[in-house]
Amino acid sequence: MSETFHIVPESTHNALVEAAYQHRGYTVDEAAAASRFSAHASRHGIRTHNALKALHLDHLFGSAAGGCKPGVQIEKKESRFAASQVWNANRKLGQATAYEAMDECIALADKYGIGQISVDNAFHYLWGGGYVMEAASRGYIAYTNCTAALAEVVPFMGKFPTLGTNPHSWGFPTTDAVGFPIVVDWATSVIAMGRVQQFLREGQPLPAGAAVDKDGNPTTDAKAVSALTTFGAHKGYGLSLINELVGAYIGGSLPTLRSRWDQHPEEKHTPAFYFQVIHPDAISGGDFALGRDQSKNVKAVIDDILGHGNENCLLPGQLEAKAAARSEAAGGLLFSPAEIEAFNEVAVECGSTPWNLSDFPVAN
Amino acid sequence: MSETFHIVPESTHNALVEAAYQHRGYTVDEAAAASRFSAHASRHGIRTHNALKALHLDHLFGSAAGGCKPGVQIEKKESRFAASQVWNANRKLGQATAYEAMDECIALADKYGIGQISVDNAFHYLWGGGYVMEAASRGYIAYTNCTAALAEVVPFMGKFPTLGTNPHSWGFPTTDAVGFPIVVDWATSVIAMGRVQQFLREGQPLPAGAAVDKDGNPTTDAKAVSALTTFGAHKGYGLSLINELVGAYIGGSLPTLRSRWDQHPEEKHTPAFYFQVIHPDAISGGDFALGRDQSKNVKAVIDDILGHGNENCLLPGQLEAKAAARSEAAGGLLFSPAEIEAFNEVAVECGSTPWNLSDFPVAN
């Protein structure tokens, strides 16, 4: 990385983030969930979902727009199904909701081998990979999907954006096997709308096949982009559709109206979350070759996949693990001068003392 | 379709397929599962997994090769997890195993809202979409994945094939909403190895990005193809890796040794299956806009996705539903003259009376 990064102690980061959330009316617990999540994202190099982005999204769609309601209680509905729960989040902060759902899903998996929690009336949880990574670090196979805030993606062969960028996130407890949890985590669009804006600013063409113009024709001209496309043609379309279907079964409403609170008040405008956790013992046949245990068997399989000349391939989650090691070695979270400047705007907003760039040493 | 298809009564098809499986040593029940599955595939236009392909695969990897054992019993292991089961299939016929697993998964979902069954020492179940489609027709959300028979796919940025074409299949109970179950079902490679052979025969170039040569460089020359690539670059790689990881947690062994019974007898050589079923009531928040019920809400969401100029988009599973309607209208299964000729080779193999092409009317 050629960019300069400064080392901000996690406690310094968390104090400011918590102050900012509390200033916007969130409770102490909600603010703590937000700072915990942002620190986790920044520690793993996830700059697209750091505290600055979280606060920006909260401003655009959340506490300022009515999409998120500080201080509300989650309503946990009665269910006749022992390994399943359905929650009405009442638009509670996404990070707080997701942490709680993952904890309860783990408790269900401990008992039933698998557990699921569906969340209606949710607010954007930011980076699904963060939640499954934590669950995987605790020894579980975890999965989550959600419907994204806005419909920005056309169905395969379509013209008009009616799907969210709808991400899927899977985490596997592979720390013993490879040193970190494998986390498969991505949006179902080729690129995010933020990247289109970046190409537009830089006057650069988009990668081929990433977007369409208003007639549904492929375009690489950032100025002509009307909507994004799904990755892998019909395959990514199917994956994006899954989130919309799961959201619809839970209680989500029309994707083109999501987050658009000014349109059709008779419809719902909230995303939905789906969480699932599997206890690895619950899928183990116990019959591993050469007397391996389950974790050693997983390691043997990964070694085989990354052997035979494939030694330079990366595992999903490896870059995030590398970033976490870098943060750990630095003893803090790494932010660019521009990011630190943006944090100081946050400090001004909530009446905190701004940071001095010179207080934060430059990372190697 | 410009190809000519003849209408073969399902009972005629099933009698021959059952005779062929019994001739190879399979029990009456196993042969019935095989014919039921093949009829289902052919009815839905899935020519890549019809009875001819099933019998060919059984010859290559199954009863003739030791990968499949006619007449064995599935061992259902004790589990401390109520919503989970792990089975040792003892290499039982994949179709029979998968049907039984899906039935039991549905019973678990009825009780716990979600249920999972993992299967070790399995034999190829052919077309995962068929099982989730049936479960979806019965009103459930269903998912399955498996490790494919051979490692033919390179990891992203890799050189050597160490991953299977590893498919994922999801089914949704959308018959009330759209007239058929939505089935998202595909391999994680861009194309199958069979397509490469077809391009080779026809002297045609491959689509770009579908394969690599022996040095891991992209190639469209069918003669130079050494391995397949995953769709969607690192995203499809992650999806393919999921099957290998799930297989490894269950009890699968090194992917490069799968189906290669002559190599490393100390390792296992079998694929693994994973099944999961969700009861739609178990994820329903019950709070649908405009007083809709769950199914009408799903329909409203799908109508929104396929509206706004997207009316020509297809839903996953729609082509299969169309093929099924065509079979239904014809009153039988549709096979080409070449396929009927191949069925007659099967008849000769098992001592059945060959078919007369002229007995089967041509479909419109």
Image: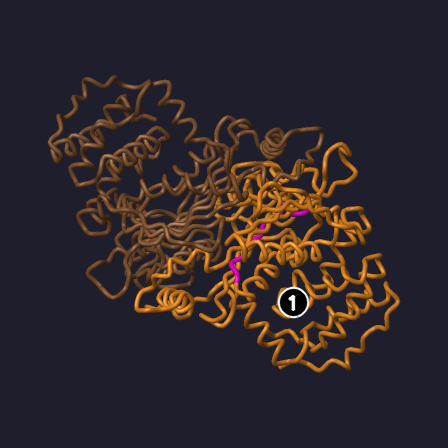
Chain colours: A brown, B orange
Q: Main secondary structure of the magenta part?
A: strand
Say which amino acid is labelled 1.
Answer: His
Residue B185 within the magenta-colored segment of the rendering: no
Residues A359 and A265: in front is: A265
Name which quarter of the figure residue B304 lies in: bottom left
- x, y (%) of residue A292? 67, 29
Residues A269 and A81: in front is: A81
User: Which residue is painted at 73% across and 73% down in the image?
Assistant: B337
Q: Is residue B355 above or below residue B40?
A: below
Residues B298 and A80: in front is: A80
The residue indicated by pointer 1 is B40
- x, y (%) of residue B79? 63, 42
Name which quarter of the figure residue B285 lies in: bottom left
For disc 1, the chain is: B
Residue B141 within the magenta-colored segment of the rendering: yes
Report whether A266 appears left or right of B98: left
Report whether A149 appears left or right of B160: left
User: Which residue is painted at 48% across and 53% down in the image?
Assistant: A81
Span colored in magenta: B140-149
User: Which residue is painted at 37% across and 30% down in the image?
Assistant: A44
Report whether A312 appears left or right of B161: left
